[in-house]
Image (spheres, coloured by chain):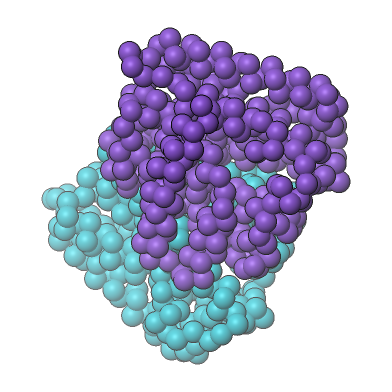
Chain colours: A cyan, B purple
Amino acid sequence: MESDLNSFRQEKLPLLEQQMKNFLQGLDAEKSLQKSMQYSLESGGKRIRPLLMLAVCQVLKKRVDEPVFAAAGSLEFVHTYSLIHDDLPEMDNDDLRRGRPTNHKVFGQAEAVLAGDGLLTASFEWLANCQLPSELKLKLIGLLATAAGPQGMVSGQVADIEGEHKELKLAQLQLLHRRKTGALIQYACQAGGLIGDANARQMIYLTQFGQSFGLAFQINDDILDVVSTQEKLGKAVHKDQAENKNTYPGLLGLKESYSELKRVVQKAKNALEGLQKNLENGKNTELLWDFLDYFSRKGNA
Amino acid sequence: MESDLNSFRQEKLPLLEQQMKNFLQGLDAEKSLQKSMQYSLESGGKRIRPLLMLAVCQVLKKRVDEPVFAAAGSLEFVHTYSLIHDDLPEMDNDDLRRGRPTNHKVFGQAEAVLAGDGLLTASFEWLANCQLPSELKLKLIGLLATAAGPQGMVSGQVADIEGEHKELKLAQLQLLHRRKTGALIQYACQAGGLIGDANARQMIYLTQFGQSFGLAFQINDDILDVVSTQEKLGKAVHKDQAENKNTYPGLLGLKESYSELKRVVQKAKNALEGLQKNLENGKNTELLWDFLDYFSRKGNA
C-alpha cells in the first residue's frame, strides 16, 4: 500500500515546494525577512498537512489542479509560522528543529517573531489572491483562521504553556491537543473536501477522519518524545518531561498511551470506511489509509 | 470644522468598541488568551485607522452600515497585534503603551506573542465571516494581508530594527515609514473606498490621500518623540534617539522635519481637493480635512 503514498509524494512534493518558493520570492519584501522565512520553510518538513489536503482532493476528484497548491502551500506557511514562534526562547526555547538550528538561533529573536508574523499574514494573502473560485476561497480563509487562531491553534499553545505549571485532566489534554495540532490537520481534510466538492455526508467523514488523525498524530508525537532518539527525530527528545509538559505518556503511562493511540487510529479507520462507502464508483480511499498508517506509526511523526 | 470630527467620533466610536468586544468575547478561546487580547484592545487607542475607514465610507455614501464596523474593527485588531509584538523585549522593549504597562509586562512574554498571533489571525476570521458581500470581503482580505504582511508592515518592522545599526538614506527612511505605518493607513482609505463603492478616479485620490496622511502621521510621530513629554504621549519619549532609530528629526533635523511635514500635509490636501471635485453633488470631504488637521498636528499623534 505504501508505494501509493510514496509515488503521490514524489509527484506532488516538487510542485508544492516550487509554488511555495515562487510565492515567497515574488513578494516585494525586505531581503533579510525573505531569507529568514525561506530558511524555516526549507527546513525539510514532511509537509504532512498540505499533502493530506492534496490527497483528500485526489481521493474525491482524481485530479489536483495547480491552484490547489496555493491552498496547500498557504497551510504549510501557517504551520511553519507556528513552529518559529513555538521555538522562541519565551515559548519552548528550542535550539534545534528538524536537525537544524531554529530560526531565532540563526536570525535573532526579533527577526524570528517577524518571520512568523510574515508567514502567517502571507498565508492569507496567498489564499485571497489565488485562482480558486471566490466563494471557495472565502470559506477556506474563514476555516483556516478559525483553525489557526484563538479558537484553535493559538489557544492550544496558550494551554500548552500554562499547563507546564499544572497537571491537566485527560479531557483538558484532549482539548489542548485538538487545538494545538488537531485543528490544522482537520482543516487540511476539510479544505481538501471543499476543494474536491465533497457532499455533506463526505464532509462529515472527512471531518471525523481529520479529528482522529490529528489526535493520533499528537499521541504518537508524545510517545516518540519518550522512546525515540535525537538522531531519529531531528530535534531534542525527553523535552516534554523536562519542561513539565502535559502529555499522554505523562498522564496515562506509556502502555495506556499505546492503547489510546490504537483506539484513535481505529476511529480514523472507521471514518475512512464511511467515506469509502460514499465515494463514486472507481474512487477509493487507499491513499488516506496510507497516510494514516505512515504517520501514526512509531518513528514517523 | 473640528466639531464635525468630534461628533463623528462620538457617534461611531461606541459602536466600534462594542463590535470589537462582541467579536472577541464570542470566540471560543482560552480565557487567559481572551483576557490578554482584550487588555491590549482596550488600552485607549484613538482608533485612527478604523475611524478613518468609516469616515471615507461616510464621505462617499453618507451612511455607514453595521457590517462596515467588522472591516473597521478587524483593522484595529491588526494594528493592536503589531503594537503588542513591537513592544516585546526582543523588539522595542517598551514597558509603557498609552500610559499603561505593555502586554508582556502584565501577561508575560509568551502570552504576549500569542495574544498578537491571536489578534492577527482573528482579524482575518472576522473579515471572512462578516456580512459584507463576498467579492468585497476577498478584496479587503487580500489588501489587508498585503498591507500588514511581508510586503508592508512586517518589512517595515524589519527595516526599523535593522536600521538601528546603520544610518538610512532619506529614500530608505521613506520606504520604511511607508511600510511600517503608511501601509495600514493607506489600507484604511482604500478599504473605505471599496466599501463605499468608489469609482476608479475617487480611488486614486483616496490612495494618494492615504499615502500622504500616513507619512505625515509618522513624521509627526517622529517629531513628537523629540519635543513632547511622557505625560502627554502616554509612552516614553526620546526613545528613538536612545535606540538609535532612524527618524526624520535624526536625519534632517527638527526644522527641516517640520518643513517636510508641511509639504506632505499639502500633498494630502491636494488629494482631498481632487476627491472633492469627483464627489456627487451634496457630498463633501470635510470630515477627512478634519482628520488630517487633527492627526498631523503637533501633540495629537
Viewer can see residue B64: yes
The picture places residue A115, in percent across and down from the top left corner, at 63, 47
* Image-quadrant location for residue A166: bottom right
User: Is residue B3 found left or right of A5 in the rendered image?
Assistant: right
The picture places residue A225, in percent across and down from the top left corner, at 58, 76
- In the picture, which quadrant includes the N terminus of chain A? bottom left
Task: Tell me: residue A103, above or below residue B139.
Answer: below
Residue at point 31%, 32% (across, down): B63
Viewer can see residue A58: no
Residue at point 28%, 69% (across, down): A269
Q: Nearer the viewer, residue B205 or A103?
A: B205
Q: Nearer the viewer, residue A173 or A221?
A: A173
Q: Nearer the viewer, residue B223 or A90?
A: B223
User: Is residue B226 found left or right of A258 in the rendered image?
Assistant: right
Q: Nearer the viewer, residue A172 or A264?
A: A172
The picture places residue B149, in percent across and down from the top left corner, at 56, 39
* Image-quadrant location for residue B214: top right
User: Is residue B69 found left or right of A41 in the rendered image?
Assistant: left
Residue at point 32%, 47% (across, down): B129
